[in-house]
Image (cartoon, rainbow, N blue to C red):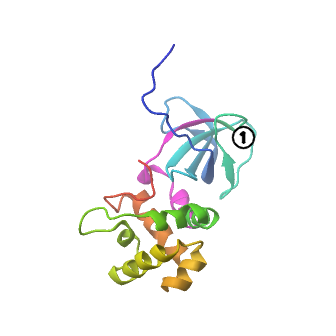
Amino acid sequence: MYRAQSSPRKYEEHAYVLDFNSRGKSSTVRGREGIIVTAIGEDRLTLLEVLGIPNSTFEIGEKIYIGKDGRTKVLSVLGKMEYEKISSSAQSELPTIVENIVTNNESKFVEYLNKAQPLTPRIHALELIPGIGKTYMKTMLEEREKKKFESYADLQERVGFKEPIKHISERIMDEITGESRMNLFVKR
């Protein structure tokens, strides 16, 4: 059947395992059971329920391929999960794994900091990141005018903003748990 697609939907290519149950029942698709994996998408940072291929093994924190072609351990991505609905062990793994994602995708997050714009006349996107107040924001905007930031270290050196990874991760956690009303990094 042909379905017209209005916008090309962006699919996650990779996800990180937060938890898995080798004899689980899906909470997003009725009647699906097997190896049920709870994971977080690397790009869109959404919580996902994934069905593993029978007899495949998973490790907490493992990066798995969930893209369209050539999956080796994943049968299908069953659906999106709400933070409240994931297991408590998945919840406790989340902060560390988010920090890994922010560390491993440095160029993507640094580019975000280089491009972030005001959200309203009063609030700049940068200010929504914990630890960045008016003063750091002003310095960041002045510095990135002169020259774009190249890395977390470059940002830290030129602005004096300590532990950018920790602060960005904290922001992502607020978005995942629903603490924040506005999302900078997590795609709904």
Total number of numbered labels? 1
Residue 5 placement, left or right of 123: right
User: Farthest left residue?
Assistant: 121
User: Farthest top residue?
Assistant: 1
Can I make out residue 186 in this image?
Answer: yes
Q: Nearer the viewer, residue 166 or 109?
A: 109
Q: Residue 86 in magenta? A: yes
- Residue 150 location in percent, x, y? 59, 71
- Secondary structure beneath disc 1? loop
Badge 1 density bin: few <14, some 14–19, many ≥20, Cα 10 Å: some
**Which residue is drawn at the image coordinates 57% and 44% (left, top)?**
12
**Which residue is drawn at the image coordinates 53% and 78% (left, top)?**
155
Can I make out residue 97 in this image?
Answer: no
Q: Nearer the viewer, residue 134 or 43?
A: 134
Q: Nearer the viewer, residue 156 or 142?
A: 142
- Residue 84 location in percent, x, y? 41, 53
**Please, what is the three-letter code of the amino acid marked with disc 1?**
Lys
**Which residue is drawn at the image coordinates 62% and 44% (left, top)?**
13
- Residue 5 location in percent, x, y? 45, 26
Q: Quadrant of residue 35?
A: top right
Q: Is residue 77 above or below residue 130?
A: above
**Which residue is drawn at the image coordinates 70% and 36% (left, top)?**
53
Q: Nearer the viewer, residue 96 or 14?
A: 14
Magenta segment boundaries in residue numbering: 76-97
What residue would you read off at disc 1? 73
Residue 72 placement, left or right of 8: right
- Residue 174 location in percent, x, y? 40, 64
Residue 52 placement, left or right of 125: right
Q: Quadrant of residue 22?
A: top right
User: Farthest front residue?
Assistant: 146
